[in-house]
């Protein structure tokens, strides 16, 4: 079987880590849909600059793919408004899922958030929950939802609050055991490794991977 992967959000923290992880493995082709090209060089890496508002024009990028890794995500501050945030974290993933499903993609793997819940009063958590519900209804043979806590790693943009929280979480990591394990900070690289490991397992059904589970799966 020709193993082709598609990565959405490859310029972000987890997305770039997923792309590197895939290229370190024996995948035949890695397609990334990006607004700006990655500096990575590999004969198997195929980069396509896309207009996310016209995603339907890039359906051929999903054709023949085995797995789609959706790592799209932003912040309300960076997006500029709640409406624009929803475009990135809700509508784009669902539009991509519809294209992937129509092209016969077997595995869809997505980065969500700890606590995602479509009925939450928190706008961010509710948006993530709505995205999860929409993806679950898409009908993939395998849907894998990853819910990390605070993500560690170097981002293209500086986020002061996130950087401060990362320092605190690292200092408290030794105490994050038992029920608190679900809140342990986790590196983008570890999330990426967990996602690729799960894709290779070729498991059917809908599965949610909590933060503590990713620490284990991503450590292999």
Image (cartoon, helix red, strand yellow):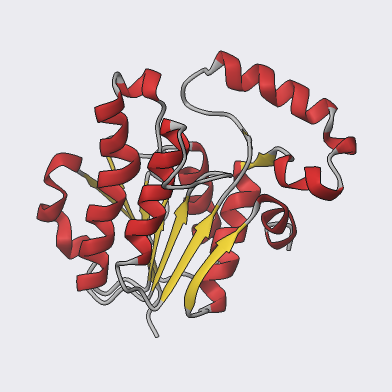
Q: Residue at position x 60%, y 51% from top? A: 191
Q: Residue 29 sits in which quadrant?
A: bottom left
| Residue 121 vs residue 36, the one in the foreground | 121
| Residue 4 vs residue 197, the one in the foreground | 197
Q: Residue at position x 15%, y 40% from top? A: 53
Q: Residue at position x 41%, y 47% from top? A: 118
x then y, percent, for residue 101: 26, 70
| Residue 133 vs residue 13, the one in the foreground | 133
Is residue 62 left or right of 205 when viewed as pictured?
left
Return the residue found at the far right: 174
Is residue 69 left or right of 181 when viewed as pictured?
left
x then y, percent, for residue 163: 63, 20
x then y, percent, for residue 24: 56, 60
Q: Quarter of the image containing the C terminus?
A: bottom right
Q: Quarter of the image containing the N terminus?
A: bottom left
Q: Residue 38 sits in which quadrant?
A: top left
Is residue 83 left or right of 200 when viewed as pictured?
left
């Amino acid at each position: 079987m020709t193993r082709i992967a598609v990565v959405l959000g490859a310029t972000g923290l987890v997305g770039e880590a997923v792309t590197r992880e895939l290229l370190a493995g024996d995948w035949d082709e890695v397609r990334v849909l990006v607004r700006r090209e990655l500096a990575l060089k590999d004969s198997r890496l195929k980069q396509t600059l896309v207009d996310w508002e016209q995603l339907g024009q890039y359906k051929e990028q999903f054709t023949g793919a085995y797995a789609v890794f959706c790592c799209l995500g932003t912040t309300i501050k960076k997006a500029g408004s709640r409406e624009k945030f929803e475009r990135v974290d809700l509508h784009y993933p669902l539009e991509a899922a519809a294209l992937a499903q129509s092209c016969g993609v077997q595995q869809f793997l997505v980065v969500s958030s700890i606590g995602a819940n479509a009925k939450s009063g928190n706008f961010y958590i509710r948006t993530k929950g709505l995205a999860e519900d929409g993806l679950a209804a898409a009908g993939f043979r395998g849907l894998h939802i990853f819910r990390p806590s605070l993500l560690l790693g170097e981002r293209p943009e500086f986020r002061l609050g996130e950087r401060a929280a990362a320092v605190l979480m690292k200092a408290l990591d030794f105490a994050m055991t038992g029920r608190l394990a679900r809140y342990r900070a986790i590196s983008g690289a570890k999330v990426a490794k967990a996602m690729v490991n799960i894709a290779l397992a070729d498991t059917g059904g809908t599965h949610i991977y909590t933060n503590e589970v990713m620490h284990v799966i991503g450590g292999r």
